[in-house]
Image (spheres, rainbow, N blue to C red):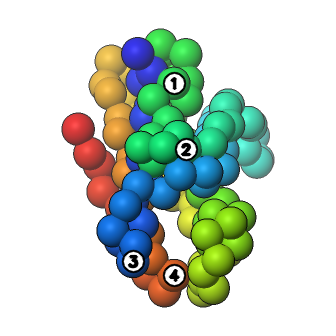
Amino acid sequence: MSQITTHVLDTALGRPAQGVPISLEFEEPDREGWDPVADGVTNADGRIGDLTDDVVAPGRYRITFDTEAYFAATGQTAFFPSVALEFWVAAGEQYHVPLLLSPYGVSSYRGS
């Protein structure tokens, strides 16, 4: 199982957000910038359960949701073209990073 998982719920439509492109990046210590780790697209249940290999290095990560592509595909107009969330990963922990999404609002939390 992936150490980092995510899912996206469209709270305006009241259903999972299928087809949201997502990228995951790692901030390399002692270097500027972000290194790509993985990318994917949410499934019919709004989830990506295999975003990473089993174990990732501890450190700072950024997950970016391409909400503009999703809203365009669903015929919605949106204020946020993308949502980027940064979070810390510790060794041995599982991380579920959900996104609650509507055309004019977003929310996230550390899930289980």
Question: Label 2 near label 1: C-beta < 8 Å?
Answer: no
Image position of 4 (left or right of 96): right
Question: Residue 92 vs residue 76: left or right?
Answer: left
Q: Are marks 3 and 4 in contact (CB under 8 Å)?
A: yes
Q: Is residue 39 above or below residue 98?
A: above
Determine the CA span between mark 2 and mark 3.
17 Å
The residue drawn where x is 55% and y is 44% is 42
- Please state if 112 lies on the left or on the right of 79 as rendered: left
Q: Determine the residue positioned at 70% across, 72% down.
A: 72
Residue under numbered circle 2: 42
- Indicate the quadrant where residue 2 lies: top left
Residue in view at x 48 percent, y 86 percent = 104
Residue labelled with disc 3: 12
Q: Is residue 62 visible?
A: no
Q: What type is the residue that disc 2 sits on? A: Thr
Q: Secondary structure at mark 3?
A: loop
Where's residue 63, x and y in %? Answer: 57, 49
Relative to 9, does residue 88 appear above or below in the rendering?
above
Residue marked by disc 4: 103
Q: Which mark is residue 50?
A: 1
Residue kind at label 3, given as amino acid type:
Ala
Q: Nearest the camera: 61 or 111?
A: 111
